[in-house]
């Protein structure tokens, strides 16, 4: 079997790590793999969003399955292009990917179908947004409707901040085309949870819930990033909760997408807020989360590949079950100083042998590159250091030991990943 993985970040490294265990005899290919992925896959020198180029390459090389990691190629229609050429692909069509690529679309779908989420309004004109913000008052969340690499949501505790955020998006194109339409929504209070569900369009197989930490600073302070760390399992992510999420959120959304002639097949990611009134949707993504994938997949005892093959071939996953290992995983992201703003690249990375050789510490690469045989930084999020352990504390200690021991100029990380699970008492 020949499998092409599209994408080359930390999430794709973790996917490749899992899939190569599921299918040791398969031949794996990856688009411009990072140095961590390179030993596991043959390199295809095409950009992950070169949709037409990848389809021709897959056709010419008899690829049996293509798995798409990031949202951009999905939003650009990679699934449709592959589908029209009869090439099995895991990932939704661009019409279905709108659940992530247009927050306006996602909010409307939820509202029409009674899926719990924050109250909201959409705006394209600054004057209208200004009036609404003045009327509502803070706290409010101002979001670019389009794709913004996880950075397009601004949680505003003051009305001035909300006005500023909306004005920058609508009047100053702070997020380019992604912010030409904005969503302004009610602030929801609670703990966040990421639930990934593999779906054939009708049935879902939810994976183990995880918790991401989006703000750059410890104590959840500062601007939002793509995610600075994650852990699983999460104490609040019980079986009963997942059941409720399936019934109240995932299945109604899938039914609505099918009824709208845009069935969603692939990985549906529900970003939830666990409010006093129950789970409510913060956002949907049309792909696996990063950095949550790096902690969810190492705990998965069942193969992932079988489910992906079934979905990619248009089959059914009804009744499929996934087994999970005992124990916990916690991931600390090492970022470049300055991220999520501008940052330097090209700093040499050193990973001590004691860390890279430890079977309970997994290092997934994201923004790394080889330069004259030296590994150097090449992105905002550089590495994920995943600690595995019998419990969350052991996992955290391993992750932190790795995060401290790995070195590069400007290394920035949060030492408090998982803090909610360690906090005393409820809340
Ligand atoms: P999003 O890009 O929509 O996932 O938002 C990024 C982050 O902003 C989320 O993970 C939350 O931490 C925060 N956020 C977004 N929407 C809300 C909301 N309505 N209430 C509170 N926090 C939110
Ligand atoms: N970790 C959040 C995301 O993948 O969008």
Image: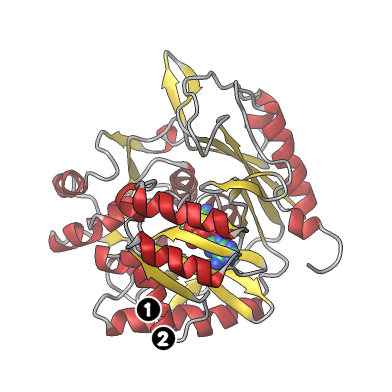
Task: Give the crowd class for mark 2: few <14, some 14-19, many >=20 residues within 10 Å.
Answer: some
* Mark carried by residue 16: none
In the rendered image of this protein, does residue 315 appear above or below residue 35?
Answer: below
Q: From this viewpoint, which residue is outermost toward the top?
A: 372
| Residue closest to the eye, 172 or 30 | 172
Q: Position of residue 101 (x, y in %)?
A: 34, 60
Q: Position of residue 46 (x, y in %)?
A: 24, 37
Q: Is residue 385 visible?
A: yes
Task: Give the crowd class for mark 1: few <14, some 14-19, many >=20 residues within 10 Å.
Answer: some
* Left or right: where 293 falls relative to 235: left
The colour style of the image is secondary structure
Q: Kindly identify which residue carries mark 2.
A: 113
Task: Give the image quarter of residue 122.
Answer: bottom left
Q: Position of residue 236 (x, y in %)?
A: 70, 70
At 34% across and 44% down in the image, what residue appears?
28
In the rendered image of this protein, does residue 264 appear above or below residue 170?
Answer: below
* Left or right: where 86 falls relative to 2: left
In the rendered image of this protein, does residue 26 appear above or below residue 309?
Answer: above
> Circle 2 sits in a helix, a strand or a loop, which is it?
loop
> Circle 1 sits in a helix, a strand or a loop, which is it?
helix
Q: Kindly identify which residue carries mark 1.
A: 109
CB within 8 Å, label 2 to label 1: yes
Task: Give the image quarter of residue 254.
Answer: bottom left
* Left or right: where 369 falls relative to 293: left
Q: Position of residue 222 (x, y in %)?
A: 62, 45
In the rendered image of this protein, does residue 411 appear above or below residue 251?
Answer: above
At 72% across and 57% down in the image, what residue appears?
327
Q: Is residue 196 visible?
A: no
| Residue closest to the eye, 5 or 127 | 127
Image quadrant for the C terminus? bottom right
Label 2 lies in ligand 1 vicinity (Cβ under 8 Å): no
């Amino acid at each position: 079997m020949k499998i092409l993985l599209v994408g080359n970040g930390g999430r794709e490294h973790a996917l490749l790590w899992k899939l190569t265990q599921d299918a040791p005899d398969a031949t794996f290919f990856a688009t411009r793999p990072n140095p961590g992925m390179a030993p596991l896959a043959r390199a295809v020198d095409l950009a992950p969003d070169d949709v037409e180029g990848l389809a021709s390459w897959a056709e010419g090389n008899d690829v049996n399955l293509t798995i798409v990691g990031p949202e951009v190629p999905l939003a650009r229609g990679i699934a449709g292009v592959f589908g029209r050429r009869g090439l099995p692909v895991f990932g939704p069509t661009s019409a279905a990917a709108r659940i992530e690529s247009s927050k306006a679309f996602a909010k409307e779908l939820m509202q029409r179908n009674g899926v719990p989420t924050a109250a909201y309004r959409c705006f394209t004109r600054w004057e209208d947004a200004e009036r609404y913000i003045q009327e509502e008052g803070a706290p409010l969340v101002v979001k670019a409707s389009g794709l913004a690499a996880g950075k397009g949501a601004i949680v505003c505790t003051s009305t001035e901040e909300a006005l500023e955020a909306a004005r920058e998006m609508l009047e100053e194109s702070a997020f380019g085309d992604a912010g030409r339409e904005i969503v302004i929504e009610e602030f929801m209070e609670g703990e966040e949870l990421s639930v990934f569900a593999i779906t054939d369009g009708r049935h879902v197989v939810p994976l183990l819930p995880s918790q991401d930490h989006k703000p750059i600073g410890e104590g959840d302070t500062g601007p939002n990033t793509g995610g600075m760390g994650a852990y699983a399992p999460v104490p609040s992510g019980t079986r009963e909760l997942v059941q409720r999420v399936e019934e109240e959120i995932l299945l109604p959304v899938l039914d609505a997408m099918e009824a709208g002639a845009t069935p969603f097949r692939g990985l549906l990611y529900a970003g939830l807020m666990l409010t006093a009134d129950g789970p409510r949707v913060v956002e949907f993504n049309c792909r696996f989360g990063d950095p949550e994938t790096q902690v969810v997949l190492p705990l998965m005892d069942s193969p992932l590949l079988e489910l992906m093959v079934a979905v990619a071939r248009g089959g059914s996953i009804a009744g499929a079950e996934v087994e999970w290992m005992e124990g916990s995983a916690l991931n600390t992201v090492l970022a470049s100083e300055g991220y999520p703003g501008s940052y330097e690249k090209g700093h040499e990375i050193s990973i001590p042998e004691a860390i890279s050789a430890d079977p309970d510490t997994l290092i997934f690469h994201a923004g790394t590159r080889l330069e004259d045989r030296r590994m150097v930084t090449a992105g905002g999020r550089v590495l994920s250091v995943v600690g595995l352990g019998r419990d969350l504390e052991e996992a955290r200690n391993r992750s932190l030991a790795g995060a401290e021991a790995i070195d590069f100029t400007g290394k920035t990380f949060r030492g408090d990943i998982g803090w909610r699970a360690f906090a005393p008492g409820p809340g």
